[in-house]
Image (cartoon, rainbow, N blue to C red):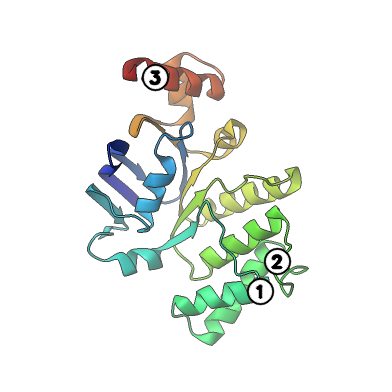
Amino acid sequence: MIEVKDLHKAFGAVKAVDGVSFTARDGEITGLLGPNGAGKTTTLRMLYTLMTPDRGQVLIDGVDAATDALTVRRRLGVLPDARGLYKRLTARENIDYFAHLQGLPDDEVRSRRDALIEALDMADIADRRTEGFSQGQRVKTAIARALVHDPRNVILDEPTNGLDVMATRALRQFMLKLKAEGRCVLFSSHIMQEVAALCDRIVVIAHGRVVADETPDALRAQTGEANLEEAFVKLIGSEEGLAA
């Protein structure tokens, strides 16, 4: 479980995150939505300890990220906005490298890596250098690398960005599989269709603040809109009006 409590982060005079709080629960997919510049990526970077909040608390399975960042990193699997593969390594070698960074023994590295290659249908690319990979191939490799240590909490920053239809469908099915295994899945997206199809709960951020934290049905009921995209636009529009 991921708990976020009153997070704040400023860059000079700009308040990127201004009191964000929410909970992403085990066995659920939680969507993090917001317009560009709303504070989503900054929030995610604080969750996986890449940034330190000015104020507030991040708890991963009850572990405080500020006091035990190493344990938090071991409990998280992260697909960041920058995929960051090592281009001279094969997909298999990229996965193995991160497994060893997590301290996995060799036999566990092999079994976990091989299971992920099968689950993500990567057999045809596993022994190719990642330089020249398509966007979908890069995302698959980055996800396998993020999950090789079998984390219970998974953070995905716009995982389907740039993917074709078939790769997007496969990734959505994989996310549902993670949920079925009882993992906590938190992901950001601009694609309302996949948010509606996947999310048990949606957290909407605008101007660095949470403006909604509800189930998709509750968001539609709250805004009086049958379409989730229209509900999102109404929520963001209301916030824009308050900020003006």
Q: Is residue 226 left or right of residue 8?
A: right
Mark 3 is surrounded, within 10 Å at the Cα level, by few (under 14), some (14 to 19) or many (20 or more) other residues, namely: few
User: Which dot, 3 or 1, sits closer to the camera?
Assistant: 1
Residue to which mark 2 is pinned? 131
At x 69%, y 53%, the residue is 135
Looking at the rendered image, the quarter that the C terminus falls into is top left
Q: Nearer the viewer, residue 84 or 234?
A: 84
**Three-letter code for the amino acid on which mark 2 is drawn:** Glu
Q: CA distance from mark 3 to mark 1?
A: 46 Å
* Residue 1 seen anywhere in this rendered image of the structure: no
Q: Earlier in the sequence, mark 3 or mark 1?
A: 1
Q: Nearer the viewer, residue 26 or 78?
A: 78
Pointers 2 and 1 in contact (C-beta within 8 Å):
yes
* Residue 241 seen anywhere in this rendered image of the structure: yes
Q: Nearer the viewer, residue 193 or 82?
A: 82
At x 53%, y 81%, the residue is 108
Residue to which mark 1 is pinned? 88
Residue to which mark 3 is pinned? 240
Q: Quadrant of residue 116?
A: bottom right
Q: Is residue 159 left or right of residue 218?
A: right
Looking at the picture, how far across and down is residue 239, in whole percent? 37, 20
**Three-letter code for the amino acid on which mark 1 is drawn:** Arg
- SS of the residue at dot 1? loop
Q: Earlier in the sequence, mark 3 or mark 2?
A: 2
Looking at the picture, how far across and down is residue 80, in whole percent? 50, 54
